[in-house]
Amino acid sequence: MEIKNLLISASISLILLASIVLAADYYAKVNTYFWVPSDAAFALSFPSDYTANNVSITSNQTTSTWISFNFTSSTESGVQPQTNGVTGDKQAGITKPIFLVQNIGNVPTTIQINASVPAGFTVCANSTTVTTCTALSGTFTNMKTSLAVGAKENITLYGSTSSASGGQSSGNVFLLSFPT
């Protein structure tokens, strides 16, 4: 009987010990990171897309849209551009800018502008936040810092010439967006 009691006692002790061991909390802590790429995409609208600023971006966001400054003489300043050679699609100051930029990415962005223009011409730009027309001379200029997701910014351009010869010349305007 003593052996039997000893076996019962040992069995109970093992069961209790096993339940204590099984009840202990064991875990592993693993740092977990969630990564979403920063998207600094923007949509660009032109005067043909809207009748005033602060409207929805619409469908004319194509690479085939172009702008032109149509001077009436070889010494003129403050000429506002138009799109695709259509007089009705002309910039009208800040209320109808040549570019309406909207942040369609997922982070606040900085919008910059630059231009390369032929000799004898200058182009300056301003925006809702940069009110002084700044000459675009080969380096990128901030037009808006921390443009919120979904927000819009007006950018206007003005062309001048003091010594250009007759005929057609071309250059480029560059818009750049990057996470702020």
Image (tube, rainbow, N blue to C red):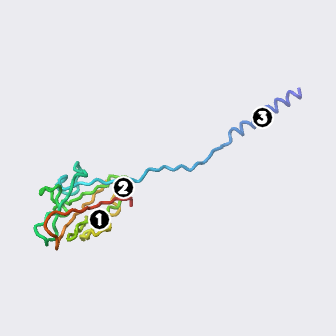
The residue carrying mark 3 is 14
Quick one: label 3, few (<14), some, or many (20+) residues within 10 Å?
A: few
User: Compared with residue 78, is residue 23 higher up or lower down, i.e. above or below?
Assistant: above
Number of numbered discs visible in the structure rendering: 3
CA gap, disc 2 to disc 3?
Answer: 64 Å
Is 100 placed left or right of 35 in the picture? Answer: left
In the image, what residue type sits under mark 3? Leu
Q: Earlier in the sequence, mark 2 or mark 3?
A: 3
For the residues carrying marks 3 and 1, which lies nearer the camera in this image?
1
CA gap, disc 3 to disc 1?
Answer: 80 Å
Q: Nearer the viewer, residue 20 or 122?
A: 122
Q: Position of residue 65 (x, y in %)?
A: 21, 53
In the image, what residue type sits under mark 1? Asn
Pick the quarter of the image with the C terminus: bottom left
Q: Within the image, what quadrant is residue 75 found in? A: bottom left
Q: Which mark is residue 40?
A: 2
Q: Nearer the viewer, residue 158 or 24?
A: 158
Quick one: label 1, few (<14), some, or many (20+) residues within 10 Å?
A: many
| Badge 1 element | strand
Q: Is residue 39 visible?
A: yes
The residue carrying mark 1 is 114
- Determine whether label 2 and label 3 are within 8 Å by CB: no
Q: Residue at x 22, y 67 (%)?
A: 118
In the image, what residue type sits under mark 2? Ala
Q: Residue at x 78, y 32 (%)?
A: 12
Q: Residue at x 19, y 58 (%)?
A: 67
For the residues carrying marks 2 and 1, which lies nearer the camera in this image?
1
User: Compared with residue 3, is residue 142 higher up or lower down, i.e. above or below?
Assistant: below
